[in-house]
Image (cartoon, rainbow, N blue to C red):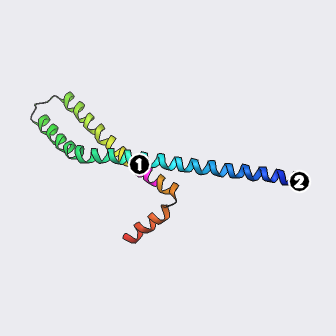
């Protein structure tokens, strides 16, 4: 029986090591997700606060310049494409903020509580 006991001890040690490694990986993943969320959230906040209003104003200005004939169609289309690309990039970042937030909630086991809180607020 001593060989069975020794084998069981080794299995226990291996299981404990596997559990510790898995726990460390989850903690590392959560920290990485938290940092990614913070970076994306800050970037989106900066874009949202500074670019959104300016973007709409600039699109109006482009339209007026084009309407008055002060800008060629090719210049107008180029400028418009650049501004729309900027808007799309901002919206993609906003989407990534939400995806990262949901990923963090899932990893941290807080998804159900967050959903219940959101439901209660309605």
Which quadrant of the figure has residue 76? Answer: top left
* Pair 1/2: label in front: 2
Residue 122 visible in the shown view: no
Counting from the top left corner in percent of width and height, residue 26 is at: 56, 50
Counting from the top left corner in percent of width and height, residue 108 is at: 51, 57
Counting from the top left corner in percent of width and height, residue 61 is at: 14, 39
Quick check: is 46 in the magenta stretch?
Answer: no
Quadrant of image for the N terminus: bottom right
Q: Main secondary structure of the magenta part?
A: helix
Q: Residues within 10 Å of mark 2 (few under 14, many from 20)?
A: few
Q: Residue at x 20, y 45 (%)?
A: 56
Which quadrant of the figure has residue 51? Answer: top left
Left or right of 4 in this view: 52: left
Left or right of 73 in this view: 42: right
Q: Secondary structure at mark 1?
A: helix
Tally of numbered tags? 2
119 or 71, which lies in front?
A: 119
Tell me how far mark 1 sits from mark 2, CA to CA: 52 Å
Quick check: is 98 in the magenta stretch?
Answer: yes
Q: Residue at x 43, y 53 (%)?
A: 101
Counting from the top left corner in percent of width and height, residue 10 is at: 78, 49
66 or 1, which lies in front?
A: 1
Left or right of 40 in this view: 64: left
Q: Secondary structure at mark 2?
A: helix
Point out which mark residue 51 bears.
none
Point out which mark residue 2 bears.
2
Q: Residue at x 53, y 50 (%)?
A: 27
Q: Residues within 10 Å of mark 1 (few under 14, many from 20)?
A: many
Q: Which residues are magenta?
A: 97-102
25 or 84, which lies in front?
A: 25
Point out which mark residue 37 bears.
1
N-terminal label among 1 and 2: 2
């Amino acid at each position: 029986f001593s060989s069975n006991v020794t084998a069981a001890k080794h299995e226990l040690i291996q299981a404990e090591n596997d559990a510790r490694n898995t726990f460390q990986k989850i903690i590392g993943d959560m920290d990485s997700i938290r940092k990614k969320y913070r970076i994306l959230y800050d970037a989106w906040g900066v874009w949202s606060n500074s670019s959104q209003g300016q973007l709409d104003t600039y699109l109006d200005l482009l339209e007026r310049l084009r309407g008055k004939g002060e800008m060629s169609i090719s210049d107008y289309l180029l400028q418009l494409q650049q501004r729309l690309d900027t808007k799309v990039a901002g919206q993609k970042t906003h989407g990534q903020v939400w995806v990262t937030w949901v990923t963090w909630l899932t990893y941290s086991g807080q998804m159900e509580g967050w959903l219940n809180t959101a439901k209660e607020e309605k």
